[in-house]
Each structure stands twice: as C-alpha cells, then as structure tokens.
Amino acid sequence: MDTAIQQRVNTWLEGNYDQATKDAIQSLQTTNPDDLADSFYRSLEFGTGGLRGIMGVGTNRMNKYTVGMATQGFANYLKKTYGSAEIRVAIGHDSRNNSRFFAETTANVFAANGIKVFLFEALRPTPELSFAIRKLHCQGGVVCTASHNPKEYNGYKAYWNDGGQLVPPHDKNVIKEVEAITSVSEVKWNGGEANISLMGKEMDNAYMDMVKGLSVYPDVIAEQHDLKIVYTPIHGTGITLVPEVLSRFGFTNVTVVEEQATPNGDFPTVAYPNPEESETMSIGLKKAKAMDADILLGTDPDADRVGVGVKNHKGEWVLMNGNQTAILAFAYLIEARKSKGIAQPNDMVITTIVTTAMINELAKQNGVACYNVLTGFKWIAELIKEKEGKENYVIGGEESFGLMIGDQLRDKDAVSAVALLCEMAAYEKNQGRTLFDKLIELYIQYGFYYESLISITKKGMNGQKEIADMMEGYRNNPPKEINGVKVQQLLDYELQTGKDLLTGESWAIKLPKSNVLQFILEDGSKISARPSGTEPKIKFYFSVCTQLEKKEDFDRQFAALEAKIKSIIAGLKLK
C-alpha cells in the first residue's frame, strides 16, 4: 500500500476514533485492501456544495468523523463572519441510511460551538430546510442527503443565510476553514445540547401555507378536484408533505404508490432513486396505466426533483424530460399571471446555461426578462438576491428535473412543483386537453426544441484524471465540425471567454468560473460538456431545434430531432 495511504490508516487506528471504526478498518485490511486504499487515498473533498460520498470508514468516506470535521470548519467560519452575534442554523435530513445520525452529529457539533440549532424532528424535504432558514432568520443551514445518488452514498449540503447553497466568497472561505481542521481532536463533539431545538408541525404548516399561496387557479381545481393523480415518493421524504399539500390544494383523487411509500434508505424497488430514470418510475407508470390516471409524479429521496408521466397525443403514457416539464411550468405561470392580471412589468424568470433555450424564446415573446446562470439552484438563488427590490422573480428551473416557484425559498422544490403541475393538468383538462397537447402547442408557437443528455462514468482513482484529460482535449483542440455541421462558437466558462471559431472574434463571459464547455453549431444545435463536481462522471447535454408547423407533423419532426442527436453522439464518439 502507498506510504501516504498507510499513514492515514495508522492515524485512524491509533487515534481518538471509536472501536467499531477501528474494527472495520482492520477487517478491510484482511478482506478488501483495495477498498481500504480507496477509503483513505484522499480526504473526502468539501466542495462548493458540501460533501458527498460513499458511506464507510476512512478519510474518503461519509462517516461521523468527516461530517464532524466539516461541521467544525463551517462553525468556525460562521463565528468569524458574525462575531459575537447570536448565530442560528437549521438542519434537516432525508430518508437515506445514516442521514438522521449525520444530522444529529452536525447538530451536536454546531451546538457545542455555542450556535443555536433548529433540527427537524424527523426526515423532511430539502426545500423545507431552505424555507426554514429564511423563516427563522438563520445564518446558515445543513441538510444531510445525497439527493438521487445510489443507496451507498450520503452527503452534506451547506446553506447560507438566504436559504441558498453556498456561493462565493462563502463557499471557498468555508472550504478553507474545513481544510484547516486536520484532526478529530479539533472538533467540539458535545456539551451544547441545550442549544438544540426540534422543529415539526409548526414549520410544516408555515411551509405548506406558502406552497398553497402559489396556486393561480384554485377555482379550476375545484372543478377538476377528482383529477386522477398517481404519486410516488420513491422511498423518500416526499411522503411527509406531498399528499397533504395536494389535499390542501383541493385534489381529492390522489393514489400513492404503496410499494414505494415507506421511507427506506435501501431503496428496495429501484436501482437508482432518481425520477430521471425510466426504470425508477416504472412501478408508478404501471399503476397510472392501470387506473387510467391523468398524471403521474415521482419525487427523489430529498424531494427536490420531480419526474412527470402523462399521456401523449396518441394516448400512450410517456415520461417527460426535465426540459419539457420546465417549459410547461414556465409557460403556465407566465400565461396564467397575464390572464389573471397579476403579471408585473418587472417579472423575471431564471434558467441555466444547459437548460433548453426554448425558455428564453418563451420569455422573450411574452416580454418577460429571462436570465441564464450556471448549473445549480444556488446561482438562481444568488441572482434573486442580487435583483431583490428591482425585479420580481416568478420561477426558475433547470433540465435536471428541478423547479423553484416563488421567492420564499432558495432551492429546487419538488413539493410545490408537484402541486403546480397537478394544477396545470387540471387547467388543461378543463380546456379539454392534456399537458402533452399543451406542450405540442408550445412547440408550434415558440419552436420545437428537443434535448437529451448522456453521462459517462470513469471509476476508480484515475477517473477524475481521465475526465480532466477529456476536457483539456476539447478545450485545446475543439472540433471544427460536428455531425457535418460547422462549430460556430466555443463557450469556455472556465476561462470565461466565448469565441467565434469562424470569424476569430472573442468576448468575455460574465458568469463565475465553471468547468463547462459549449459548442454552438451553425444550425443552432448546442452541445455542452460538464464534469460532475461530486462524482467521477462527465455529462454531455445536447439541444437541437426545428420548426413545427402543425400537430400532425409532431411525430415526423420528433423522430428527425432524435436521429440528429444520435448522429451528434456518434460523431463525437461518445458511445
């Protein structure tokens, strides 16, 4: 074993760690030395979003010690920032294995540092944590979740006083403080229990009142109250609030997928608890078909992402992608606010650089300001803060099945998204249409945009390097054409420059640095390459577009767009 790795192992075997941890390390030494090496070859990185990793013993794993050290660093930064003022933090967690333990560990460390802690009494959706931070005027917050990752993972997401995840300069400053904690002996583990208060029904009711206030057409729901809704929480936190929120909206015919209703960190019915995966939604889809439902919805373990199933123009059940869901939601709120006379001249919407450009076109044609930010809702939250008092935020969203409606929280929220999507389905049903009929109408009106993505995973210690080499190759030697079409622009968000490859003209990109490359082709197609910040994987996003003259042309044009994306993937040799 590498000497540096062995030294880390010895530190844990000889240091102030519990016996169960030491026993587990010794067991790995004899049964799985490769796993032991992976567990200790580096320290689990506290990135700009916090921690995320496989659970287990070691410096490169999620465990009591890595969580405690991260919390001590975060506590130190909060105290440096706020001095002698009272500091308050809110803490939540999802249904994953050890999430409650990690949340309680986090609470104990903050409390031992003299910080006032508001801890949810049990699992709750992540968006409610963001809401609670704002409601309780906290300076920070943490939610223990790995969102939609496989069951072996857990994580730790850090928030600032606006209810959004950490952004500059706080993200880098917290990272420095976390990295400065080099020993578990520097962590204050206990002694502040009196600083911890539990949150429960009172916060739930405040949050659900906020969500109910987002409803635009309660009268339509009254007419369509028996809309057939099938909902699956995919063994996650959504079960705690989503059925109740739908009831408060006025929906009376909600069926919860029983097989996936109970919170369970093993996610026994799915390979990945991610509503982006068709296999994950398959049990719900089967139930929706059997019941002849109007809409199917699924939320991930921490209930910040939502997957949607509807019947298409042929009456066949289909799962919509995140861009399609976002288009419907943005259009509904923009159109409904106009129709109800509540639209403001300074209304704005926010999307991200890898989300469909159809949202920009929709906003433009409706006279609504639309801003594009980097991937991640923390950047949407940051822009809302920047525009506060000047522009009126309505909705934000991104392609990865996330929506954030209204400005009373600052993270993606599948609870309010489920409620609004059901209201949208009720509104369209009242017009004699389905959500898919509406989607086709939007394609005719604003242009037929279609998007897809693929993820390439590079496992092991060399995975991150392979991905870095791939990005450097694209950056230094960008393709001159893709799928027979000239590459017109290269947008490099890491170097913060854009370049027209045909004319040589270049310009500055006024967004924070991010390791993303985009190729804009002459025909309007867009390909984006973006490595994950938390896993050894790289995502490629593809966007193509055409004109759709009439509904009858939908299938032919859709097939052509799908074929075009397949050709682009083949041309880039990505599969």
Image (cartoon, grey):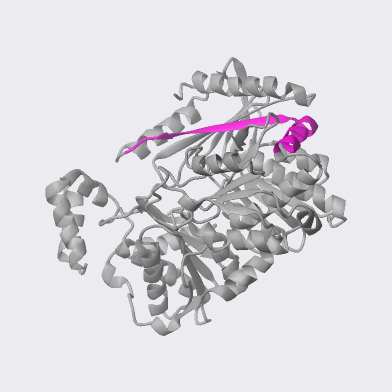
Q: Quadrant of residue 289?
A: top right
Q: In this view, does 487 lie to the left or right of 313?
A: left
Residue in the image at 30% along x and 71% along y: 186
* Extreme residue toward the front, this view: 290
The answer to whether residue 103 of the structure is visible from this angle is yes
Query: Residue 89: where, in percent of width, then height?
Result: 50, 72
Q: In which quarter of the image is residue 560?
A: top right
Which residue occupies the foreground of this view, 458 or 196? 196
- Quarter of the picture holding the C terminus: top left
Q: In this view, does 11 lie to the left or right of 88?
A: left
Question: 95 above or below 228?
Answer: below
Is residue 448 highlighted in magenta? yes
* Extreme residue toward the left, this view: 30
Residue in the image at 34% along x and 50% along y: 152
Which residue occupies the foreground of this view, 475 or 131? 131
- Quarter of the picture holding the N terminus: top left
Query: Residue 187: where, in percent of width, then height?
Result: 32, 72
Question: 226 above or below 314?
Answer: below
Question: 331 above or below 66?
Answer: above
The answer to whether residue 480 of the structure is visible from this angle is no
Instruction: Give, as a single range, the part of the protein colored magenta.
Output: 436-459
Question: 100 above or below 575?
Answer: below
Number of dots carrying numbers: 0
Which residue occupies the foreground of this view, 297 or 133? 297
Is residue 310 highlighted in magenta? no
